[in-house]
Image: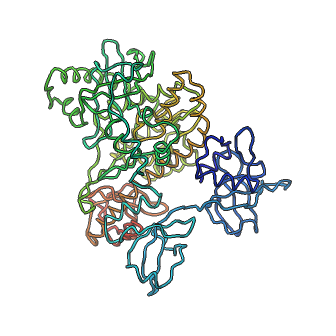
Amino acid sequence: MKSLLIRLTLGLSELDISPQERVYVDNFMQKKYLTYKNNVYKFNSKYRAGTLGLVQKGTAYLNVIGENVRDLFIGEGDLGTAKEGDLIIAQRLLGVRGTPRAKIAEIVGRAISYSVGYVTLKDEHLSMVDLKTDFPVGVELSQKELESYEIGDVFKINNQENKIMEKLGNIKDPKVDELIVLAQYNKHDEFTPEVLEIAKSFKEVDVKNYPSRKDLRDLEFCTIDPVTAKDYDDAIYWDDENTTLYVAIADVSEYVKPFGALDNEAIYRSFSIYLPHRSIPMLPRQLSETLCSLQPHVDRLAFVFEMKLDLDSLEVSSSTVYEAIIHSDKRFDYEEIDDFFDGKLKAKNDKEKKIFDDLTKLRIVTNKLKTKRLKVGYDFRSEEIEMKIDEDSNLVATTVADETPSHSLIEDCMLLANKEAARKFDRGIFRIHEEPSQAKIQMLYQELAGIGMNIDIKHSMKETITDIQRQAKEMDLEAEVDTLIIRSQMQARYAPLNSGHFGLGFDEYTHFTSPIRRYSDLIVHRLLKAINNNDTVEGSYVLRNIEALAMTISEKEREASSIEVEFMARKFSRWANENLNKEFKAKITATDPEVKAELNDVIKGARLNIVSSENIILFEDVIVSIDKVDIAKAKIFAKVIKKEE
């Protein structure tokens, strides 16, 4: 619904209305919320759509969505039954002096459309409460219905209709965790028969069917990915003689065309979701893991950036992007390439020797690119925790993912292609990252001063942060301080207009290199193809609702990230529940407003709410005892036993 409201704020073309949205548009037209002109629907100037802000004493502010205008004050008596966070259509009250005001015309969506409820015993009576808040769910249930369920039974709730959608399982079963985190955002794993039928309809690549594509099958492309990867988005080839880097990306846009069931599902998902034990793909696996995936020893369609580098300035002197056919010669994992760089892996044949020689030369170039990049951009160290889950969906181990030379090589190749893609258009999908607010920076400085760091404000933010990182290294707190710096940053997002990427230090940046798992990249591919072909019709279609699309996929990205984080929190809490009253090493990660810590023992990364502590300092190493676990809320409570020597 939010996406529809944003598009109606900006102007929604008749051509872009789905059958499901048509019902709402016709209803809004009848109520005269909308105008219709030149085949475009738009909110009447009297009406605004938005989310309801903090409700206090019967008044609130409406945070208008889709346009940069002042919030609207909703006075006492004008709220109706609306609650904080609800999606609202409001009527502006014109001719009123002072703060712009409005009254609620209609509630069109709840703050949280879907939630999870579970059956518990409250005051000796069975009750179904919200998993996160412990408040009763809005579903009307008789005592007889409740008694037909078991304590701990978990259900997906539709908050729009206050109805139970499905039973997910029981809170005691670790396998229900995955279903819980997906249900909260109405995500699903299975594809409809219609979508699967489309995905299965594509034939293997036959070169004769693509005479206009550039044939790059003679170039020694290779892919370098995690050992568990199945969807290979990108392949690289370095032509050392001509100092030219080829970055070949899976040509998803050849298969996923605008409109239709396949594209609609891709938009709805917008991102693949990666859980420790499996992925939930944006595209059906028939595409994501086979036909689109740049597998070795088969012909594949690719969208290729060919970039000539000036090795003196380390700038791209010229670049072209075009549709091609490649034939990847080898699929490597990161560990193999690191072993080769360490001298532990030798080429098995002449083809591998040629690839290894190219990668050796390319590594020198990417190392220089990284050095240059970090003179203006930032290099933040943060630990990425990887989980091992057993067949019963229980946590058995954690490891810390290392940034290695092979990761770095691929990263700088992809950054180069993404940067070049962003230079090809003025309006589209950019990946932007704004500078942090002064309030957050001041808070960061206060936290760092609290651990004994001397904050010397330099001429630029870059110089100041670099000096902070230097002190952190001397204090052996590099990762911890970088985590604080990251917390102070604005969140990167997608936008239709460029405003640069603060963290990377790039003037322009987009996402081009992962169309199998990110819808943003697919849009960029479509736009670049339209530009290449001078196809103004396709180009105007891609850009028609670009503002709404940028907002929608930014929101979907946050949802995917929340699912991944919460799933891990649920696994940590179940492990902690099996280790009550046991002592573990931990590190204090926050002291204000509450004391928090992270486990740093046999299991790493579990977040702890510290319930008993005295004279605790930020980043101090402590011994904690797990005191209590709330499995439903996935929260672990612990007390500090002593400070670690």
Up-down relation of residue 21 to residue 355 (above or below): below
- Quadrant for the N terminus in the image: bottom right
Residue in the image at 36% along x and 44% along y: 478
Residue in the image at 25% along x and 31% along y: 296
Residue 263 vs residue 589: left or right?
A: right
Residue 349 vs residue 16: left or right?
A: left
Residue 644 x %, y %: 28, 60
| Farthest residue, direction bottom | 124
Residue 443 x %, y %: 53, 50
Q: Nearer the viewer, residue 20 or 219?
A: 20
**Quadrant of residue 110 within the rendered picture:** bottom right
Residue in the image at 74% along x and 55% along y: 30
Residue 71 vs residue 363: left or right?
A: right
| Structure colour scheme | rainbow
Residue in the image at 40% along x and 17% along y: 309
Q: Nearer the viewer, residue 422 or 192?
A: 192
Residue 482 x %, y %: 41, 45
Q: Nearer the viewer, residue 547 or 608?
A: 547
